Amino acid sequence: MERFKREKIADGVHFNAIYDDRFKTSRILVSMMTDISSERCAAYSAVAGLLVHSCKAFPSFLSLSRELDRLYGATLSGSSGKRGDSQLINISAHGISDAYSIGGESVYEELAQLLCGALFEPNAADGAFSREDFLQEQRQLIDSIDAQFNDKRAYARKRFLEVMCKGDKYGVNLLGTKEQVNALTPSAVYEAYCELIRTARVEIVCLTSNDTENVKRIFTERFAGIDRAPRTTKTIVVPSADKVTEHTDRLDVVQSKLMLGFRTACAEPDEDADAVKLMCAVLGGTAHSKLFNNVREKLSLCYYCVSSYDANKGVMTVESGVENENIGKTKNAVLAELEDIKNGKVTDEEIESAKLSMTNSYLTSVDSSAGTQAWYLAQVFKGKSLTPQEQAERICRVSKEQIVEAAKRLTLDTVYVLTSDKEGE
């Protein structure tokens, strides 16, 4: 079974080693956390792509691809994500474990060197990224924004957060706007990169069956040359809603989208978050939930109706796809199901089904190397060190009374509707 060890190797930089011999591959992830900034988010997202497109040692995508092929088909990838009010810029490498290399070479250490080359020696000169690489990444960001608009469910989620969290970092779209992306320059993105390297909180997570001391040394030496001034990040949890905001967007859509946003004072690492997680699952988080069985199946009011809870921000969301004429009925039906939970109208079967679904999700999340790495990174950011089994046991200990109390603490904040562009259509 995996063994976890965490060490500080520089100011604001930690090296997290997970020993796990179940997999035939090794993974190295560098996650940089910084406050979400509406002005900087697009540039940070561009950094994630540019760092893995090329580097000084391999200044073209072709040369970098050949090096990855030499390392037995290893991969190098970058991404940008959100955790509460923070943006995560991730770059990761994935390759075979040393035991499977033909010549006995340490692929793991070579991957670490390659990843450090991408992180500390990007393809840049005179304070700017390669213009050719920059233009390609800029086009990809524009394509991602277009794809988000074309996927109306994703677009509704984006607009819902912008409405519910107006003026809040959590409501910022990490891709930025088309105008922001078009305004980027190679030098502006390089400036954002330099700021990240100097000020972001950095978590390095290594999952392997190999010894990690040499890899830790490689990263320690690299960060020793950086004049670090890490900034702390903080997520603001809004405990309750003072009023209900209702907002409707109109586009040429066939299926309307209805989204309800709720506030709760409970967020990680608050231990009561487990009760909110289970309450959310009972309401609409599984195929045995109240929203699925009653609103979707019995009443046939919508195509889908699911609830989700972001424990990092203390926000619960219910989203559904509905016919225009059923928007109001669906909203009322969802609120009625939530009211039932507040009044204790929850069966033992509903609770046990939700617990079974959640515990199964936890236990299977570490069936892959990527899932195992993601699990422990999440634990690091939460300031915890729970195994999936321990988290599953915590969920199983949540009582019906705790579920009811969690529901009572919810307050409706926002009702968002995306519907057809013609009134009454």
Image (cartoon, grey):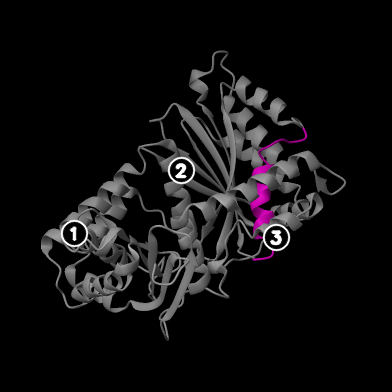
Residue density around tag 3, few if under 14, some if 14–19, many if 20 or more, within 10 Å:
few
Q: Nearer the viewer, residue 113 or 422?
A: 422
Q: Nearer the viewer, residue 360 or 144?
A: 144
Q: Amino acid at mark 1?
A: Asn
The residue depicted at 57 percent of the width and 31 percent of the height is 75
The residue to which callout 2 is attached is: 373
Q: Amino acid at mark 2?
A: Gln
Residue density around tag 2, few if under 14, some if 14–19, many if 20 or more, within 10 Å:
many
Q: Earlier in the sequence, mark 3 or mark 1?
A: 3
The residue depicted at 78 percent of the width and 35 percent of the height is 56
Percent of width and height locating residue 300: 21, 60
Q: Is residue 386 above or below residue 290?
A: above
| Element on which disc 1 rests | helix
Q: Residue furthest right?
A: 126
Percent of width and height locating residue 79: 58, 47
| Element on which disc 3 rests | helix
Q: Find residue 293 and name its label.
A: 1
In this picture, residue 287 sits left or right of residue 248: left
| Label 2, label 1: how far apart the Cα atoms are | 34 Å
The residue to which callout 3 is attached is: 179
Q: Residue furthest bottom?
A: 242
In this picture, residue 169 sits left or right of residue 382: right
Q: Is residue 26 above or below residue 345?
A: above
Q: Earlier in the sequence, mark 2 or mark 1?
A: 1
Magenta residues, as a range? 38-56
Q: Is residue 33 above or below residue 126?
A: below
Q: Amino acid at mark 3?
A: Glu
| Element on which disc 2 rests | helix
Is-magenta flag for residue 288?
A: no
Quadrant assignment, res 103: top right
